[in-house]
Image (cartoon, grey):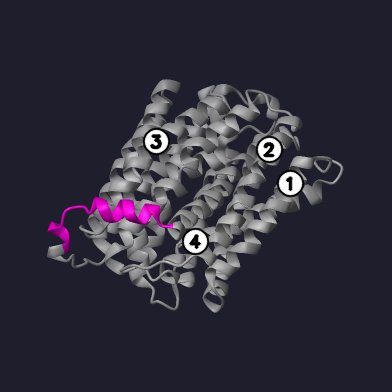
Amino acid sequence: MAALIIAGEAIFLLPFIVMRVFKPIIRDVFRISDLEIGEAQALYGLTALLSYFFGGFIADKWEARKLLSVSLLLTSIGGIVMVSIPSVAAFKILYALWGVSTIFLFWSALIKATRQWGNQNNQGLSFGLLDGGRGLFAACIALTGAAILSYFFPEEAVEITHTDKKNTLQYILTTITSIVLLIGFLVWFTLPKQRVDSKNKSTPFNYKLAFALLKKPKIIFYSLLILSAYSGYKLTGVFGIYAKDVWGFSIENATYFAVLIQFTRPITVVLIGWIGDRFTPSKVIIPCFISMAIASFLIGFGGLEKNYLIISFCLFILIALGTYSLRGLYFALLEEIKTPIQLTGTLVGIISIIGFTPDIFMSLFTGYILGKNPTVIEYQQLFSFFTLFPLLGLIASMGFRKNSLQWE
């Protein structure tokens, strides 16, 4: 399980965690706007969309050890390109390629291996441990990067030049790229070999089954539930730049705030996964969406940014807690709906087609609203619009619980 946890987050360090934590300095070094970053991440989402669909089929036919290792190796090669600080156009192409390297051979294989590791009564805890461990690993990497940033930046903010920022970012990217590459080798040599049913390996992809599942109401609600939850996770990438642009934090302090948000993840997902096993996961999901909707509405309503900084700060923590709780629960629903183990990869690929489309539109949506020089008004608009997503998730959760699903 330890290898799955480390690999499960290492694959996303370069395309996501780096941007989520170090976005303020990335904007300055690459001289790139939020909208251009959104376009790059939208390209990631488009290539990932196809990768989810066909990757689920591959996960049911090949052992996880090989799939995960190759994915990590390919992703680390992209990290080498990013260290060179390429042009904005190359930056966007790199994200498109990462959409394939991080998803096609990786995502469904990871979820299937985790489900096989846990028994039918501990799926919430299994996925909670997976995402909690991933969160702890990501937070530690982010903290290391923040320490590098603090070490290399001059003490006086007025002395920080573009060269200072570029050199610091390159140190951070080189460190993280090296970690991803090493973990690829670690997974190859430590993850146990798995037997793959030769009959399953030679069976062609069942398109009729895939499209039949896509039409089932419970699967549709399941997909929308993940879409809403994942939109919240994508929004956490804004927290650091919000701290800089609205609260007036320095780049260093804004980075540490983003790191703090990362550290709420491991505790939350493990605890909520354990709670989900004691109750029904789909029941526990409902209050998570409610808390996210209330917090985002209050931030969007405005008036708390500076006069009531502590309250504003707590609202961001509440969104993070709701978001990470959902991440610890939504794949535990695979057991709740009694998914046959041999169809796990296929179903994960199917629900991911809809569920992870925020990779396409959320960054574009964020970049379009914030523009090049966002003020508190743009951030209020962003959070006001975002409130619709947890409300959609609440409706999807109720629809999921109401509908039944027959596998035969």
- CA distance for labels 4 and 1: 23 Å
- Name the residue type under label 1: Phe
- CA distance for labels 2 and 1: 16 Å
Read off the residue under disc 4: 330
Say whether marks 2 and 3 touch (CB < 8 Å): no
| Residue 203 sits inside the magenta stretch | yes
Question: In x, y percent, where is residue 346?
Answer: 31, 56
The answer to which of marks 4 and 1 sits earlier in the sequence is 1
The answer to which of marks 4 and 3 sits earlier in the sequence is 3
Quick one: label 4, few (<14), some, or many (20+) residues within 10 Å?
A: many
- Name the residue type under label 2: Tyr
Q: Mark 2 falls on what kind of element?
A: helix
| Residue 233 sits inside the magenta stretch | no
Question: In x, y percent, where is residue 114?
Answer: 37, 65
Read off the residue under disc 1: 297
The answer to which of marks 2 and 3 sits earlier in the sequence is 3
